Image (cartoon, rainbow, N blue to C red):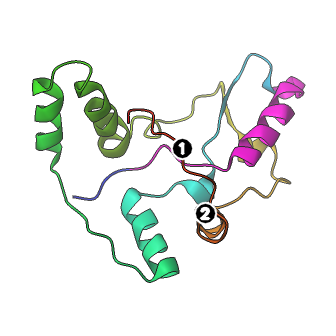
Amino acid sequence: MELVYLAIPNYEEDIALYTIKVANDPRTCNRTVVYRLPKNFISQNEVISLRKRKTGRNFNRKFVSEEEIVKLSEILPSPENIPVSIIHSVFIKGDLVNFELGENHDEVSKLYPDHKYKSIDELLDIFLVDPPPPASAAFG
């Protein structure tokens, strides 16, 4: 099963710069601004393949069906069911990205086409050449 889309990972510095631009732009007043950068709209399997090409390393992958994930979210006690539900929502349903932008929505890369944001390919180069120190997972 091909997992849907990630939560569209973006470089923190790009998000910070866009946020400053949005905060100071009268065009964005009373509007919803979405950080859905086109070059970073990529599936989890595409990220894995890209990293494999960059490192030459294979990854041990275990596929879990949507039905198994839904069942886990139903049978696990709270709060253990929360991460499984989030994984289902983000990685399988694509709830963070599978929606149309309405007339009151703006996408930042269209508002500020002059800013050349970092692509997933460039982000992987940063993480592989000079990786940041490890951080704790949100549901670790």
Q: Which mark is residue 31?
A: none
Element at label 1: loop
* Quadrant in which the C terminus appears: top left
- The residue at 82%/46% (across/down) is 112
- Nearest the camera: 109 or 50? 50
Q: CA distance from mark 2 to mark 1?
A: 13 Å
Circle count: 2
Task: Tell me if 101 is positioned left or right of 130 in this view.
Answer: left
- The mark nearer the N terminus, 2 or 1, is 2
On whether residue 6 falls in the magenta region, the answer is: yes
Task: Tell me if 13 is positioned left or right of 70 in this view.
Answer: right
Q: In the rendered image, which quarter is residue 44 located in?
A: bottom left
Element at label 2: helix
- The residue at 63%/28% (across/down) is 103
* Quadrant in which the N terminus appears: bottom left
Q: Position of residue 57 (x, y in %)?
A: 40, 79
Disc 2 crowd rating (10 Å Cα; few below 14, some 14-19, many 20+) is: few
**Which amino acid is tagged 1?**
Ala
**Which residue in the structure is indicated by mark 2?**
127
Q: Which mark is residue 135?
A: 1
* Callout 2–callout 1 Cβ contact below 8 Å: no
In the image, is residue 2 above or below residue 25? below
Q: Position of residue 84 (x, y in %)?
A: 26, 34
Q: Position of residue 73 (x, y in %)?
A: 18, 29
Pick out the residue farthest to the front: 133
**Which amino acid is tagged 2?**
Phe
- The residue at 61%/63% (across/down) is 127
Task: Tell me if 19 is positioned left or right of 89 in this view.
Answer: right
Magenta region = 5-27
Examine the residues drawn in magenta and state their main secondary structure: helix
- The residue at 53%/54% (across/down) is 41
